Image (spheres, grey):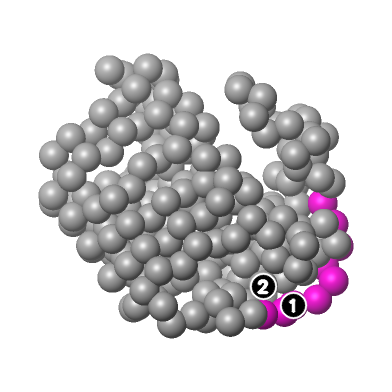
């Protein structure tokens, strides 16, 4: 699958998820992400950029394509050009060497694969409380990442999501997580404690994992 096909598949998946939220058909146990908060999917208007981001403007939301700033910290805003920022695309921050801290608001619903992969200076990553899933390879190779929490509400953790995050010391798996992909925490040599909250977990083979 070439890059163009991969991007087309990604865009289609984003549309499907946002449409499910807008229609109220995606399971939401707590009711925090109501159809009123997530509007129907819009049409791509044009790409654009500011001093920190390249992004795509849809008629109803913004999708972050690439970080182009040069600071040591950045906060992904609630809105850009008066539209809510819902999406961080695949590889948007991949291999960045300057960022030590990334914050995002709770508008972010979807993060693409490899989003923060090999951000070797990253120590502090604060995710949206409304994130649906942690994608494959999200933080692979973020060897200095130490300040990080998985938000309650996340439903799955992708394969190799935190592989080689050697400074992680403790991870709490929320009860909302029902699936953890293969090698999600492989070679996290500093990881001493994994706390699994009440809930049911399955590995990549569909095997039940006993919870705490």
Q: Are marks 2 and 1 in contact (CB under 8 Å)?
A: yes
Q: Which corner quadrant of the image does residue 194 belong to?
A: top left
The secondary structure type at the circle numbered 1 is strand
Quarter of the N terminus within the rendering:
bottom right
Q: Marks 2/1: CA distance?
A: 6 Å
Q: Nearer the viewer, residue 200 or 129?
A: 129
Residue drawn where x is 72% and y is 56% of the image: 84
Using the rendered image of the protein, determine whether residue 187 is visible from the camera's viewpoint: no
**Residue at label 1?**
47
**Range shown magenta:** 41-49
Q: Indicate the position of residue 125 as horizontal and vertical percent values.
A: 38, 55
178 left or right, relative to 203: right
Using the rendered image of the protein, determine whether residue 68 is visible from the camera's viewpoint: yes
User: Does the magenta portion include 102?
Assistant: no
The secondary structure type at the circle numbered 2 is strand
**Residue at label 2?**
55
User: Does the magenta portion include 48?
Assistant: yes
Residue drawn where x is 36% and y is 74% of the image: 72
Residue drawn where x is 48% and y is 27% of the image: 176
Quarter of the C terminus within the rendering:
top left
Residue drawn where x is 61% and y is 22% of the image: 29
The tag earlier along the polypeptide, 2 or 1, is: 1
154 left or right, relative to 171: right
């Amino acid at each position: 699958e070439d890059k163009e096909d991969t991007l087309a598949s990604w865009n289609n998946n984003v549309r499907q998820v946002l449409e499910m939220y807008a229609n109220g058909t995606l399971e939401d146990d707590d009711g925090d992400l109501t159809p009123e908060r997530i509007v129907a999917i819009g049409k791509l208007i044009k790409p654009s950029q500011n001093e920190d981001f390249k992004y795509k403007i849809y008629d109803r939301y913004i999708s972050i394509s690439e970080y182009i700033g040069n600071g040591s910290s950045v906060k992904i805003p609630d809105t850009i050009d008066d539209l809510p920022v819902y999406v961080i695309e695949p590889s948007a921050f991949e291999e960045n060497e300057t960022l030590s801290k990334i914050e995002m608001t709770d508008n972010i619903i979807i993060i693409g694969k490899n989003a923060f992969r090999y951000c070797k200076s990253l120590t502090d990553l604060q995710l949206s409380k409304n994130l649906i899933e942690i994608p494959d390879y999200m933080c692979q190779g973020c060897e200095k990442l130490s300040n990080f929490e998985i938000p309650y509400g996340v439903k799955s953790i992708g394969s190799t999501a935190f592989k080689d995050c050697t400074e992680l010391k403790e991870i709490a798996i929320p009860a909302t997580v029902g699936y953890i992909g293969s090698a999600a925490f492989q070679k996290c040599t500093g990881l001493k404690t994994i706390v699994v909250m009440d809930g049911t977990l399955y590995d990549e083979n569909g095997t039940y994992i006993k919870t705490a």
